[in-house]
Amino acid sequence: MTHRLSDYDKIIVASHNEGKVREIRELLKPFGLETISAGDLGLPEPEETETTFAGNAKIKALSAATISKLPALSDDSGLAVDALGGDPGIYAARWAEIPKSEGGGRDFDMAMWHVHDRIGDNPDRRARFICALCLAFPDGHTSVYEGKVEGQIIWPPRGDKGFGYDPVFQAMGDRKTFAEIDPAEKHAKSHRADAFAKFLKDQFPS
């Protein structure tokens, strides 16, 4: 079985996160691939039991590729804050989870407050977004591409153009948060863009 996306016209984005799906769809648009999200197909969300971004990305991609019989691309990403020993890390989304007894869902305003509160008076505001992309094929073949972007945590949150922790993350050398800059500018410098550059070099070599 081929392991080149150029031999396919469709790919599954193995995510139910609309913000993440939107970014990946924009990054794949120039390559003529029809992107279908796991949410669109009603695919289940597998339990993420690994302790690394790469491990959890592989779980999600393999699940979607096996069920759909199409190549699948997953993203596992998170925010690592130095003052918190790398937390929330792979648990970034879980920090936003609302207990089912309180209605369920995710509240990233709450998650950002937890980050700010736990940093407290620590002057070390260094942080980075980390992304692991996994491309999986129906036969079980996988490739993983990792990227990151360095920056710092700012407070209070600023901007409404991003999602997740974007309003409190300011990339190194920037004066605006990821939620304040134009999405195209973010796509060019983000952790996801770094991982995508490696993915594209491997899958669509010029």
Image (cartoon, rainbow, N blue to C red):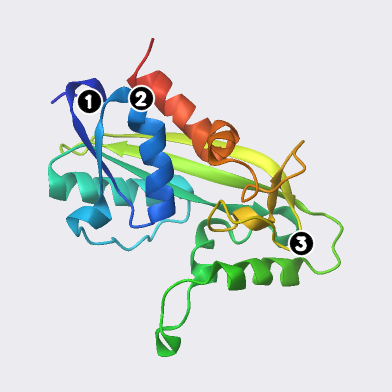
| Disc 3 element | loop
Q: Taking 18 as reference, is 84 left or right?
A: right
Q: Which dot, 1 or 2, sits closer to the camera?
A: 2
Picture quadrant of residue 8: top left
Query: Quick check: 56 above or below 95?
Result: above
Q: Nearer the viewer, residue 12 or 91?
A: 12
Q: Residues within 10 Å of mark 1 (few under 14, many from 20)?
A: some
Q: Earlier in the sequence, mark 1 or mark 2?
A: 1
Whether pointer 1 and pointer 2 mark residues with C-beta atoms closer than 8 Å, the reply is no
Q: Find disc 1 in the rendering and name its residue.
A: 3
* Quadrant location of the C terminus in the rendered image: top left
Where residue 62 sits: x, y (%)?
Answer: 25, 46
Q: Residue at x 18, y 22 (%)?
A: 7
Where residue 41 sits: x, y (%)?
Answer: 18, 54
The three-letter amino acid code for the residue at tag 3 is Trp
Q: Find disc 3 in the rendering and name its residue.
A: 155
Q: CA distance from mark 1 to mark 2?
A: 20 Å
- Give the residue at the far top of this rendering: 206
Q: CA distance from mark 2 to mark 3?
A: 36 Å
Q: Earlier in the sequence, mark 1 or mark 3?
A: 1
Q: Residues within 10 Å of mark 3 (few under 14, many from 20)?
A: few
Q: Nearer the viewer, residue 146 or 50?
A: 146
Q: Find disc 2 in the rendering and name its residue.
A: 30
Q: What numbered label is drawn on residue 88?
A: none
Q: Residue at x 30, y 49 (%)?
A: 14
The three-letter amino acid code for the residue at tag 2 is Pro
